């Protein structure tokens, strides 16, 4: 693989775009080297500006569950685009989308379409605060819900202290109504509700974390969270931007049999175009303008072309797709684990469905404290080894890899072989 063209493009990009990218994780800062620029994607493959082909394990960070440039999605986009790109007025297609989401997510009696997961999470929290007339929100260390100020906070010292800004530009006033807890810590959750249950507007959680790397919920964690919220008049918000339509057509809540008060969706539901949504119980969503007092708006919300891509994607979320994704995930999990065992390098593989992460960790990763102890240097070297073998893996230890309906079992074996070789080179 040569990267000369990508390197030159990155230099040129860096003159006009911070870090040469339009989203930080793409810059390869966590793994070193220069980001690869791509020209085309199809099925399970990406085609770089340098003329190299990569087996893709990112899938645009989740949306490409069918594989890139899925024929039916592209056809829908082309067909609908010729009738206009954006009306700024209601269309029947948006009703169809909302009805399809309600059918897949019975907890979402009403929803509002927006253009990104950040918008969905930011808006859901505002609605929860408006509905409960409370200010305090709770999130979990290591979970990411987009870049709204109130969500860019990190734990203060000790559990359940008010957050401190985790980014420059976030004011302490924006952060100081956000409490942060360790993920999977049921006792800390109970203690918080004991102490402050009446002040809490909402708890927002990734039902399976992707943003620490793949971290599954401990048994009873999500159920307890939803029960405690209901008991104390707080709004439980499942951030299913990543897990929605990924872990099942009805997301983690279908997979685990949960009924949250609100849900955020994104990524897969837009099929690769800017489409996300938030929603939940009708009595909560009736707070949203123009019906209720909570303001939220968007020029491109429910955009007809994006909705067409979303609907064409939802049409293809068949039982066979999830059976295939489960088979792929199991094969890859087994192959990566064997490579780790053969190398003698400490590491664990964690997976839920088609979300998977290889952690360079001594033991299981159950929360941010565990994740933070991973060997970042080893990850970076392993990532480079995969890249040199034509496998495009998320460029951060704290991200999940994603598989698609376009991947094959042979592709899984190829990734495992590349990983095994890269691990051997680390010994
Ligand atoms: P967007 O604003 O990026 O559409 O969604 C924010 C968001 C919300 N909730 C969850 C659980 C998410 O994973 C995300 C965004 N995920 C990252 C990847 N970890 C997107 C990639 C990026 O930031 O470039």
Image (tube, rainbow, N blue to C red):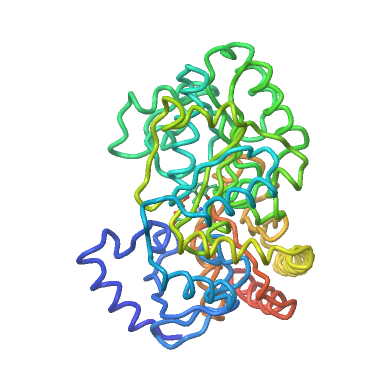
Give percent across and percent down for residue 96: 59, 54
Say above or below: 41 vs 142: below
**Residue at the far left in the pictured view:** 15
Give percent across and percent down for residue 217: 70, 40
Give percent across and percent down for residue 6: 35, 78
Which residue is drawn at the image coordinates 38% and 53% (left, top)?
A: 300
Residue 423 lies in quadrant: bottom right
Give percent across and percent down for residue 289: 42, 32
Instruction: Pick the quarter of the image with the C terminus.
Output: bottom right
Which residue is drawn at the image coordinates 33% and 83% (left, top)?
A: 5
Left-right relation of 221 to 20: right
State the count of labels: 0
Say above or below: 380 vs 101: below
Residue 200 lies in quadrant: top right
Of 166 and 145, which appears nearest the observer?
Answer: 145
**Residue at the far bottom in the pictured view:** 51
Left-right relation of 28 to 263: left
Of 13 and 100, which appears nearest the observer?
Answer: 100
């Amino acid at each position: 693989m040569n990267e000369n063209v990508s390197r030159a493009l990155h230099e040129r990009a860096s003159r006009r775009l911070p870090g040469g990218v339009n989203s930080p994780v793409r810059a390869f800062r966590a793994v070193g080297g220069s980001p690869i620029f791509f020209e085309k994607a199809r099925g399970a493959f990406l085609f770089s500006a340098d003329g190299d082909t990569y087996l893709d394990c990112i899938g645009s960070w989740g949306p490409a569950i069918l594989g890139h440039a899925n024929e039916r999605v592209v056809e829908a986009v082309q067909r609908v685009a010729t009738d206009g790109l954006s009306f700024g007025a209601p269309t029947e297609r948006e009703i169809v989308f909302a009805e399809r989401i309600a059918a897949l997510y019975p907890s979402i009696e009403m929803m509002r379409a927006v253009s990104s997961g950040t918008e969905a999470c930011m808006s859901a929290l505002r609605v929860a605060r408006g509905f409960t007339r409370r200010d305090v929100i709770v999130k979990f260390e290591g979970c990411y819900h987009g870049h709204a100020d109130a969500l860019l906070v990190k734990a203060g010292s000790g559990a359940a202290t008010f957050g401190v800004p985790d980014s420059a530009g976030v004011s302490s006033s924006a952060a100081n109504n956000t409490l942060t807890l360790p993920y999977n810590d049921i006792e800390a959750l109970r203690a918080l509700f004991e102490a402050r249950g009446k002040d809490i507007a909402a708890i927002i959680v990734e039902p399976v974390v992707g943003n620490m790397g793949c971290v599954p919920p401990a048994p009873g964690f999500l159920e307890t969270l939803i029960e405690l919220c209901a008991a104390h008049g707080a709004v439980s918000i499942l951030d299913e931007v990543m897990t929605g339509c990924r872990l099942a057509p009805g997301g983690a809540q279908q997979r685990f049999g949960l009924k949250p008060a609100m849900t955020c969706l994104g990524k897969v539901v837009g099929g690769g175009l800017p489409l996300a949504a938030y929603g939940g119980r009708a009595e909560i969503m009736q707070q949203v303008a123009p019906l209720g007092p909570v303001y939220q708006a968007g020029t491109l919300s429910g955009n007809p072309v994006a909705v067409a891509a979303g609907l064409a994607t939802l049409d293809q979320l068949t039982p066979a797709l999830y059976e295939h994704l489960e088979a792929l995930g199991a094969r890859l999990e087994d192959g990566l684990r064997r490579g780790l065992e053969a190398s003698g390098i400490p590491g664990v593989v964690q997976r839920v469905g088609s979300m998977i992460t290889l952690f360079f960790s001594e033991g299981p990763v159950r929360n941010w404290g565990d994740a933070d102890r991973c060997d970042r240097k080893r990850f970076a070297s392993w990532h480079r080894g995969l890249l040199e073998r034509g496998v495009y893996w998320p460029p951060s230890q704290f991200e999940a890899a994603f598989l698609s309906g376009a991947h094959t079992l042979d592709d899984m074996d190829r990734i495992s072989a590349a990983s095994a070789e890269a691990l051997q080179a680390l010994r």
